[in-house]
Image (cartoon, rainbow, N blue to C red):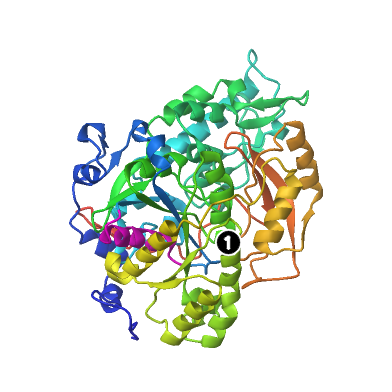
Amino acid sequence: MVLLLYSTNKIYNYIQMKSDIEIAQAVEMTHINTIASKLSINEDDLELYGKYKAKLPLTLIDESKIKNNHLVLVTALTPTPAGEGKTTTSIGLTEGMNKIGKKTTVVLREPSLGPVFGIKGGAAGGGFSQVVPMEDINLHFTGDFSAIEKANNLLSALIDNNLQSKTKNLGLDQRTIGWKRVMDMNDRSLRDITIGLGGTANGIPRQDGFNITPASEVMAILCMAENFKDLKTRLGNIYVGLTFKKEPIYARDLKAENAMAILLKDAIKPNLVQTMEGNPAIIHGGPFANIAQGTNTILATKMGLSLSDYVITEAGFGADLGAEKFLDIKCVSGGLKPEAVVLVATVRALRHHGGATKEEYNDANTERVTNGFSNLEKHIENIKKFNLNPVVAINAFPTDSKEEVDIVIEKCAAMGVQAIVANGFANGGDGMIDLAKAVVSEVEGGKNKFKQLYDWNLPITDKIEKIAKEIYGADGVDYAKKALMDLKKIDALGLNALPICMAKTQKSFSDNDKLLARPTGFRVSVREFEFAAGAGFIIPILGKMMRMPGLPATPASEGMCIDDDGKISGLS
């Protein structure tokens, strides 16, 4: 095996012998009371879930402190199917920041069981940059996803109950119902189903379906809510459908918001855990970035900023999805102002965008890295459009050659951007000190003054075109007939001033996942629109995006095992 010249201490030889879960299980965790004390949280304020997890009360959020502390976003170039290590980088950077004396908390999303048992096998970091207890975080954790699922499905039950009611029937036209049930598992067989069969006692027959829980508007609402009152208001604003008289029906018309909020009374509170090096980690919410906003809750981010000097957070998939939504939706809605952006890149991904096949990802090739750099170049340009100068983190792999890494560093420097080799996977915080210093330098330099890409009050088509042309590099936008009809409905409902949450493949800047690197001469097509009136954004559906994934031919679940003592293996 080829070892990186800049790898120190714990090396990849050892890591290749150990899985992520084995490394995590070897850590001697600190009691959560001690972790809380690092944030000056009183033990009486913690709601304990065993010895290593706790809920944090919303009373700990202090708006007066938030404006004086520093928010750092971690995003990435367009990833390979395996991902490029944003979570690993976020956790490792947090360790590095604390090592150089900066009181720092990492704030992340909660993993979804669908990808855990489907492809990823775990989403709590990797190597020596993980959050623990790894098994709990990747599985049921503190029950937040279950609560979101139940609140979502309660509304579904109330809708179908009202259809059958003879005394309280709202006249809802079942053909217009857009609300679906959810389940936190990849199950393609549930995408389109028929319910209410078996006679009148079993309800009104109609077409329905399931989304995966991270795609639920309830998840999006939890992540956008500013407080419990705002949560209830947003739940009440969920659009259900139209009556036969073409009048809109919302969840509040079914008197659903209070009951749904009751199910979310604990889920709204952020979760405190720890990194492998004993630093604080807040994990809360988990929407996907290709079909939703792809960031943790506003409440969790504000909690971190209330309790520590720096917050490191991430946004899902590439910067064209997660970062754009983080900046244009979450930050504008929550009044957040990031002061630095870390753009994660891997030599492997640059080879991919330079034409390497999956079998060639680990083969050193300077020509492919040079050609693939155009993808990273476009992401750097995009971040700068928000008046933020990114720092590139080269997430190190043992197959990286020095020549390839030097190409990335030199090309970034030519764009006025620092590129730092990040060895958090192999070395934890020790491997991230250089990156930490570069991030602090950007923040303390004071030149990054965040500005949003577009004005929310622009017409919907103008906002979409702004994203498509400036962020994706498209020549224009085409709208299917259904999309044009949906725009008329959105206008009739008075939702034009909401921001845009694009639903698009994460594999390309375009809506065609075969167009890699930095495609040009393409247009994007909006098939239809969905809208989240409660969460507060419009969702153009580009290409063939769907909200219920299927399992791969060989699910990750097949490699998992639990022994007679309850010890889990294969969850990584």
- Which residue range is magenta in the image? 84-102
Among the 4 quarters of the image, the one containing residue 471: bottom right
Question: Left or right of 427: which side holds 539?
Answer: right
Membership of 402 in magenta stretch = no
Of helix, strand and loop, which mostly describes the magenta segment? helix
**Residue 13 point in image, percent of width and height:** 27, 79
Say which quadrant the N terminus sits in. bottom left
Residue 224, position in %: x, y? 51, 39
Q: Is residue 88 magenta?
A: yes
Asked if one can make out residue 39 in the rendered structure from this viewpoint, the answer is: yes
- Residue at (34% x, 62% y) in the render: 92
* Residue 253 position by quadrant: top right
Q: Residues within 10 Å of mark 1 (few under 14, many from 20)?
A: some
Residue 357, position in %: x, y? 55, 80
* Residue 260, above or below 7: above
Q: Position of residue 112 (x, y in %)?
A: 44, 50
| One can see residue 572 in this view | no
Q: Secondary structure at mark 1?
A: helix
Residue furthest to the top in view is 167
Determine which residue is flagged by label 1.
384
Judged left or right of residue 105, residue 156 is right
Which of the 4 quarters of the picture holds residue 394?
bottom left
Position of residue 262 relative to residue 195, above or below, is above
Amino acid bearing label 1? Lys
As drawn, 447 above or below 47: below
Q: Is residue 356 left or right of residue 70?
A: right
